Amino acid sequence: MGMLYCDHAILIQTPDGQNILIDGGPDSQQINLELSKKLPFWDRTIDLVICTQPQADHVTGLVEVLHRYKVKQVLEPGVSYNSSIYREWLRVIEDKGIKYNLARAGQDIDL
């Protein structure tokens, strides 16, 4: 199992080889640089992206991650938040057809 912590972003690599990214931090270049150090260039898959809150310091990096990586599913709080970066995050999820889950207490997520 591996882990990467970068500002407001955490990458967890499970023993089964799955990649889980929690938040993306405020800097899209920084998170992509750090991810490129942990993920091999031939494997551009992130099994689950979790957005813990819709503010820019958590979402900004995630938008670029959605563009650069094959994200299988996202989990997020579904909080209404009026910002351009959060609207972009939701738009890219929809445009790419990424499986979208709203977080709730006691929820199980299949990877």
Image (cartoon, grey):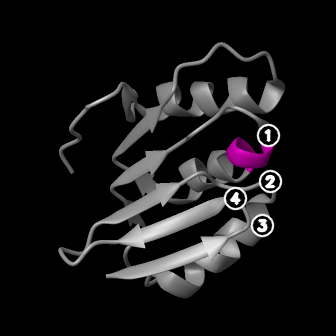
Instruction: Assess disc 1: are there few (<14), some (14-19) or many (≥20) residues with their C-alpha within 10 Å of its C-alpha.
Output: some
Q: Going 70% across and 46% down the picture, which residue do you hit? A: 58
Q: Quadrant of residue 17?
A: bottom left
**Residue that carries the numbered disc 3 in the rendered image:** 29
- Say which mark, if any, is on residue 56: 1
**Residue 83 image point, x, y percent:** 81, 23
Q: CA distance from mark 3 to mark 1?
A: 14 Å
> Disc 2, disc 1: CB below 8 Å?
yes
Q: Amino acid at mark 1?
A: Ala
Q: Principal SS element in the magenta part?
A: helix
Q: Is residue 22 left or right of residue 59?
A: left
Q: Amino acid at mark 2?
A: Pro
Task: Based on the picture, tell me whether residue 57 belongs to the magenta stretch.
Answer: yes
Which stretch did the figure color magenta? 56-60
Q: CA distance from mark 4 to mark 1?
A: 10 Å
Q: Secondary structure at mark 2?
A: loop
Q: CA distance from mark 3 to mark 2?
A: 9 Å
Task: Based on the picture, tell me whether residue 32 belongs to the magenta stretch.
Answer: no
Q: Is residue 70 left or right of residue 24?
A: left
Label 4 or label 1, whichever lies nearer to me, is: 4
